[in-house]
Structures are given as C-alpha cells and as structure tokens.
Image (tube, rainbow, N blue to C red):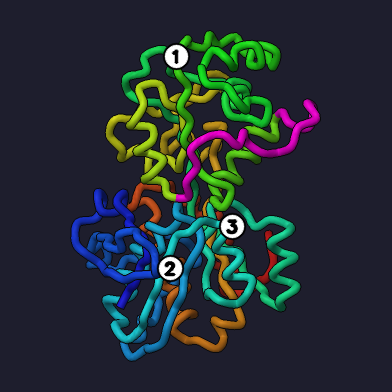
Amino acid sequence: MIRNRRWASMLALLLPFALFAAACGDDDDTATATDDTAADGDAADTDTDTDTDEGGDLSGTIVVSGSSTVEPISIAVAERFAEANPGVDISVDGPGTGDGFELFCQGETDINDASSKVKDEQIAQCEENGVEFVELQIGNDGIAMMTNTANDAVSCLTLADIYALVGPESQGFGNWSDAQDLATELGSDTEMPDAPLDVTGPGEESGTYASFVELVIEEFNEDRDQNAETRPDYQASADDNVIIQGIQGSDTSFGWVGFAFAREAEGVKVLEVDGGDGCIAPTDETIADNSYPVSRPLFIYVNPAKAEENPALTAFVDFYLNDAIDSVSEVGYVDLADDTLSSTVERWDARTTGAA
C-alpha cells in the first residue's frame, strides 16, 4: 500500500494509472498516478550494480517526506517496490525540503527527500535530537526560470537580471522595467520590458527556494550588504503545480520551479539563463554537465538507525539505488553519471553518515 497526501498532477501527466489515495487533514486532493515502469526490473548500469532481494514477505511501514521536487521520484520507486512487497505500507509526502527536515530531525520520518543540500541548522537540529543521516544523491535538476508564452519581450535573463527582479532589493517592483536600473548597475545590458511583473515562486519551506537563493541571490547579496533571501512580496507556494498555474495566469509573469515540472507544462516559456558564458537553456545535457547556471543535485536522506531496525526500509533504499534509479529520468529529471551513482551506492552500503 502506498499513501500520498497531496495532488501530484505533474506526475499524473507523466504516469498513466492511479496509484493511491489518502488524507492528511487538509483540503488538497490526494490522488496521484504513476507508470508501471518496473516490468523488467532492470538494475542501474554501474559497477556497483547488485541484484536486490525484493523480499515479497516483507512487512512494515516506511514514511518518506520532504521535497515536492523529489516527491515524484520517490512515488515512482515506491510503486515499483510495492508490486513485489505488498505487505509494506509506504507513505510519500511533499511539504517541502525544510518542513521535511523538521520531521526527519525529530525522528518522525524514515527518509527525507531534498532538492537542496542539508543546511548547518538542519544538521544541528538532527544532532540535538540524536538523529543521524546518510546523504544520498540520486539525480540532478535545473531550476527553470519561466514567463508566460505570451511574453515575447523576454527570452534570456542574466543572473543579475534575476536578482534585480526578485532579490532582496526588489521589494515593491510591480513592473519589469522597475528592475532596469538595478540590473544595469550589476552589469547587465538586458532591456527590461515596460510590462506588469507578476511573480510566483517557491516559499521558504521549499528546497527549490533554498537552491535558488544559493545559486542566484548569493552571487550578489553579500557585496551589496543584503540578506541572502528573495523579496517577500510575491505569491509563494511549496506546490510546484500552483507556481505553474501562477505563471499561466499572467501574460507577463515570472517564476521558477524544478525543470521537470516546467518542461511538461503548457502555457509557460522556459527562459535561457546567462551566467557569464552566454545564454544557455536548461536541458538534460546542460543540467548534467552543470553548464546551465541554475543546476542542482537531488538527494534522499535516510535515518540509518531506523533502517537497522526496519528490514523493509533497508530493502527499499537498496531497491531505490539499484533497481529503480531509472525512475529519476522516467519522471523527467536527469540521471547521475555512473561514477557519481557508484559513489552514492558505496555511501549507502557503508552507511556513511553526515553530509558529504
């Protein structure tokens, strides 16, 4: 049995049959769908590839929470694992990386999905509660900068442009052209259109927000004596689908989500980004080689003490990394290079705790 507590409509577009339904006390729809992608059970093509004992007699409970970006991957893996292990009850939820770490570091979950690397304050919280973790990179993603398809005036933005539009000095900017002077001061020669600026993006609980701040805002804020944060006055959500809807709802919108969500969405235009080497579009190739300036790794964090006590959890992570790692690309993200995947498997096999 697999349970999920929010509507994953992006996954439903990708994967064609109903997976599960459950409730967690809010008004969100709780249905999602996933693809029967495990018919052949092929393992990852790496030197460390091993056959996983699927253990059809396994029983127990596995609780996964965290990133809404990584959530579709974990849902797909959970469905495949459940086919061979129907006695295991798997719950997958996506409230955001930060909210997920709150639960994980209190020992309330077994795995935290994360679209940004664990932060010092999260490490301290886990240490305070005696919770160790094994950090496992499972894929790559790019953060897509978007506007509406109707916005013909914008096709590429520099990092300086993005900072000028949504950085800590941009509060109150209601028009793209309001950011012109700041962008120019930062070295950009982009001509901002005279058009309403309607911003929709992740909230602070989201790992996508944290990655965005690290990759874009922190390029400029310290030199300008500003906090590492975005402007507070925009429509914020931890749900990538809500952000997509915000972009679709305004002809001159701006926002950002994980590339896997943006690439499948209608009514949005994914912008190229110039990080100093010219305008580069997010693609599987540019994200994998990090030439796209706003690329990031994706992780799962596993509680090794819970894995030792729960054979189902150990089997699930083994299955995730060996038999079902192709779920990363099947739901729209970018696979790890073979050597990086090998390092991830070795880290799990050795139960190496702490951040890499």
Identify the residue at the far bottom of this view. 57
Residue 56 x/y as whole percent: 31, 86
Cβ atoms at labels 3 and 2 below 8 Å apart: no
* Among numbered discs 3 and 1, the one appearing first in the sequence: 3
Which is closer to the viewer, label 1 or label 2? 1
Amino acid type indicated by mark 2: Tyr
Identify the amino acid type marked 3.
Gly
Tell me where residue 1 appears, x and y as whole percent: 30, 78
In the image: residue 136, left or right of residue 60: right
The residue drawn where x is 38% and y is 32% is 247
Judge from the rendering whether residue 123 lies leftward or rightward of residue 274; answer left or right.
right
Amino acid type indicated by mark 1: Ala
Q: CA distance from mark 3 to mark 1?
A: 34 Å
Asked whether the beta carbons under mark 1 and mark 2 sit within 8 Å of each other, the answer is no
Query: Regarding mark 1 in the picture, which secondary structure is present there?
Result: loop
**In the displayed structure image, the side of residue 248 where residue 138 appears, left or right:** right
Q: Is residue 99 left or right of residue 19?
A: right
Dot 3 or dot 2, earlier in sequence: 3
- Residue matched to label 3: 98
319 or 299: nearer the viewer: 299
Give coordinates of residue 44: x percent, y percent: 40, 62
Up-down relation of residue 124 to residue 249 (above or below): below
Quarter-of-image position of residue 125:
bottom right
Quarter the C terminus occupies = bottom right
Tell which of 92 and 235 is nearer to you: 235
Query: Quick check: is 223 in the magenta stretch?
Result: yes
Residue picked out by circle 2: 320
Please name the residue shown 71% across and 38% down the image: 228
333 or 231: nearer the eye? 231
Q: Which residue position is annotated with label 1?
A: 195
Q: Position of residue 148 (x, y in %)?
A: 36, 25
